[in-house]
Amino acid sequence: MNALFARLERVSLNANLLMGFSIGLVIAIIIGLSALSSLSRLQADLEQMYDIDLQGISHIKDANLNLIYMSRAMRHMLIAQDDATRDVALATIKRSREKLIIELAEARKRIIREAGIARYDAFQRDLTKALEAIEQAVGMIQREKMNPSAAAQFITSKEFGTLIAAADGGLHELTDQKEKAAEASLHQTREAAANTRNLALGMLLAGVGLAIGLGIVIGRSIQRPNDRLRQAVEDLAAGKVDGAIPCADYPNEVGVMARAIGVLQAIYRQSNDQHWVKTHVSTIGGVLQQAEDFPTLAQAAVSRVAPAINAGHGAFYVAGSEGAYSLLASYGYRERKSLSNSFRIGEGLVGQCVMEKSPILLTAPQNYIRINSGLGEGPPASIIVLPVIHGDRVLGVLEMASFQKFTERERAVLESLLPVLATSMEILDRNLKTRELLAATQEQAERMEKQAAQMEEQTVEMEAQQYEIKAAEERSRQILGSVKDGIVGLDNDGTVTFANAAAHTLLGYPDHEFLGRKLHGLIHHHHPDGSEFPVNECAMYQTSRDGKPRNVADEVLWCKDGTAIPVEYSTTPVFKGEQLIGTVVVYRDISEHKRAEQKIATINERFELVNQATSEGLWDMTVVAGDPVNMANEFWWADKFRALLGFTDENDFPNVLGSWANRLHPDDKERTLAAFAAHLNDRSGKTPYDIEYQLQRKDGTYRWYRARGATLRDKNGVPLRVAGSLAEIAGR
């Protein structure tokens, strides 16, 4: 049965319906043909009963009447007084006899049963005797004419009556037999009709049952895949996006629907992945905003990121004052004497990631740190090293390792978190500096309070102390006024209690329209997209309520003229003892930063298009301290540069000077390096770098190339960066 359902489920809906209709039509045709056959047999039986029995009865009764007519005509002839009457009676006797013979002949044709034939033969014998007696009587009447006493005596004799009665009785017996035969035929016909009716009814019921059974089978063959598809849709609605869609290989309408659901599942899975990424980025970003120092921020980053991407090992390296990147926080990390916790630019994967400013992904690395726990340890299947970049500075490096390969959405989480982490680090750095400034200001205020107390005690020194207080206040105002960031003090209701000049001028407000106003309703009332910003969702308001510092980098403040400017800001609670008395908000206009980022992205896109369009290989070198041979100089060889020499990637042709210099032909090496040094060392910039030389390709052969370059210098002519191109000289 399951095999039948499986075959029917793959049939199209039209084919199923056509099959059901065809089978129903065949059943109807069979029932109709059976009924027609039964009706034909019934009609034949009725026609036979009419032709054999009823017509036979009619002929026998007609023969009986003619026998009666002969007897009556014979009596008329007997009592006739003239010859004319006697002749009429004689003609009647002859005519009746002829009809009697004809009717009996017709009746004999319709007697088919053996009993009837035997009775008919006996009747014929009696009839022959009766007819002979009638002929004898007629002859006697004709001979005696007017005095038929002998004829009358013969006619009234017992012998003559017995012969006539025997003939008449034979006709009646034949009639009774035919009537009984007719009744038997009628009974058989009725039974045949009843059987036909029962057969038709049985076939009808069987056809209805078969049609219902077939309908159930076809219905189930349609319902079963639909139920599986409905369950798949319900699972999809419940968030189960990884299950297989049934019936997708069916070549019918169900298969089309299943494949459409499969497309919907793919879209929903992509949307689910995006929601998953945004949720984790938002959650981790919220945690990072609450960090009050770099160790807390770094530890929060690795502790939150590692479980989110199923990493078993994590490390966060932060840039130090000496240009090295030191381990500041870790996840699942066990310190080893053989491994360094600090890396300079270009050292190890961490230093290489800083130098390239791009992620590094390795699969199944060899001799790598092992992920361990109390139950055991093992090597990771995949590691990823990512730079945390803000502007053009690499603030830190995040390193993650996992037993499985990182999935696309896990890598998406990491890529989305890098800007958030960079912004949080930058804002935290500024907040720490602002807090130091506020601490100095508070220290001055405390000192001023002490001085005021001394003024009350020492009236002699009051003027000098007042002057000192005014000077301190002036210094505080100057300090706050010199800061380009807006600094605002709020009470617990969000009312502005103090603000430096940058706070209100940045937004186009005069001082008297800014102080004493509710800050959120004045400058923070809507989101960047214009939707209303509820005050209870405002980070400034939340800090005034829960006393937790926050950092925000994706909101806007609204100017007096109705325009919005993008800002990054931090909120710092102010306590008096253990009582929260207000909040200090520090915000900065990052419009130029946003435009710079967009400009850099445009320049990068333009450079990439030019690089793809040119047939020459491009190269670039950063000159550290104006020294062309400084080991810290960073080199970059374009992919097309490598391709001209038969190389494919950085593994074959690393971004170092030796990759190019070591492949110069011995005859050309000295003059080529001398020409390059002469170009760089000429601070007037008049010595060009345009030279032809031979380079060794990856296959060991040498070819001629033409190299050209240009140098960016400072105002003193010291080289800062040199870039150029390499083109193969055809035919040389």
Image (cartoon, rainbow, N blue to C red):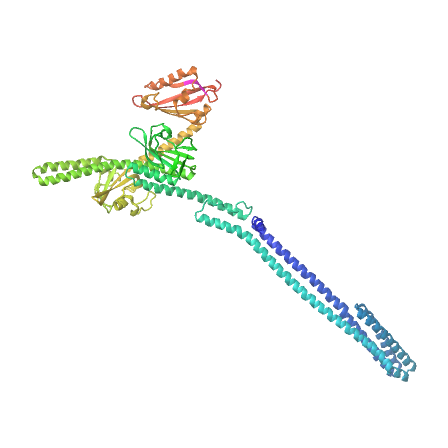
Q: What segment is highlighted magenta in the picture?
A: 691-696
The part of the image, by quadrant, that contains residue 444 is top left
* In the depicted structure, whether residue 167 falls above or below residue 245: below
Q: Is 75 left, or right, of 194 in this rendering?
A: right
Residue 434 in the image, given as x and y percentages of width and height:
24, 37
Q: Which of the two residues, 428 or 612, is positioned nearer the viewer here?
A: 428
Q: Is 7 left, or right, of 438 in this rendering?
A: right
Name the chief secondary structure element in magenta.
strand
Total labels: the figure holds 0
The part of the image, by quadrant, that contains residue 334 is top left
Residue 136 in the image, given as x and y percentages of width and height:
90, 78
Extreme-left residue of the structure? 460
Q: Which of the two residues, 463 or 103, is positioned nearer the viewer here?
A: 463
**Does the image show residue 25?**
yes
Extreme-top residue of the structure? 667
Residue 433 in the image, given as x and y percentages of width and height:
25, 35
* In the depicted structure, whether residue 637 falls above or below residue 583: above
Extreme-right residue of the structure? 143
**Does the image show residue 564?**
no
Residue at 40% in and 43% down: 276
Residue 525 in the image, given as x and y percentages of width and height:
29, 45
Extreme-front residue of the structure? 375
Q: Which of the two residues, 616 or 316, is positioned nearer the viewer here?
A: 316
Task: Answer whether residue 322 is magenta in the image.
Answer: no
The part of the image, by quadrant, that contains residue 715 is top left
Q: Is 687 left, or right, of 117 in this rendering?
A: left
